[in-house]
Image: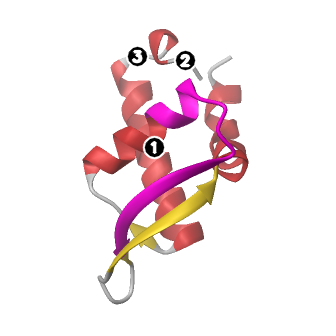
Amino acid sequence: MSADLLSDSELSEVAARVEEVLLNRYQLRVRPEMIQYVSRRLRQSQQTTIPVMGGDARTGVAIRQLLPADELRAALTPISRGRS
């Protein structure tokens, strides 16, 4: 999932998918800057966890979580396979 190979519309689709995964799977609301950060970290690094800051989806309380990068990549895999 290289940023150089994705068009602007594909990048926005990936960002929307990242936001959806964070909200549905981890109950975490994040700002657009954090979505870009997570997307970039998934593309550029081989870390096992990615620190994510946002708000609890139910309460809005600010939280920081270390999310498993492999799970996030797996959730985004249908996008990259569909573009091959």
* Disc marking residue 7: 3
Crowd around label 1: few <14 · some 14–19 · many ≥20 (10 Å): many
Question: Mark 1 vs mark 3: which is more N-terminal?
Answer: 3
Give the residue type that dot 2 points to.
Ser
* Disc marking residue 38: 1
Give the residue type that dot 1 points to.
Val
Could you tell me which residue is drawn at 34 percent across and 21 percent down? 8
Label 1 with label 2: CB-CB less than 8 Å: no
Crowd around label 2: few <14 · some 14–19 · many ≥20 (10 Å): few
Crowd around label 3: few <14 · some 14–19 · many ≥20 (10 Å): few
Indicate yes or no whether the magenta region holds residue 42: yes
The secondary structure type at the circle numbered 2 is loop
The span shown in magenta is 40-55
69 sits to left or right of 61: right
Question: Whole-percent x and y of residue 52?
Answer: 44, 57
Question: Mark 1 vs mark 2: which is more N-terminal?
Answer: 2
CA distance for labels 1 and 2: 14 Å
Which of the two discs, 3 and 2, sits closer to the camera? 2
Q: Is residue 33 above or below residue 68?
A: above
The secondary structure type at the circle numbered 1 is helix
Give the residue type that dot 3 points to.
Ser
The secondary structure type at the circle numbered 3 is loop
Image quadrant holding the C terminus, namely top right
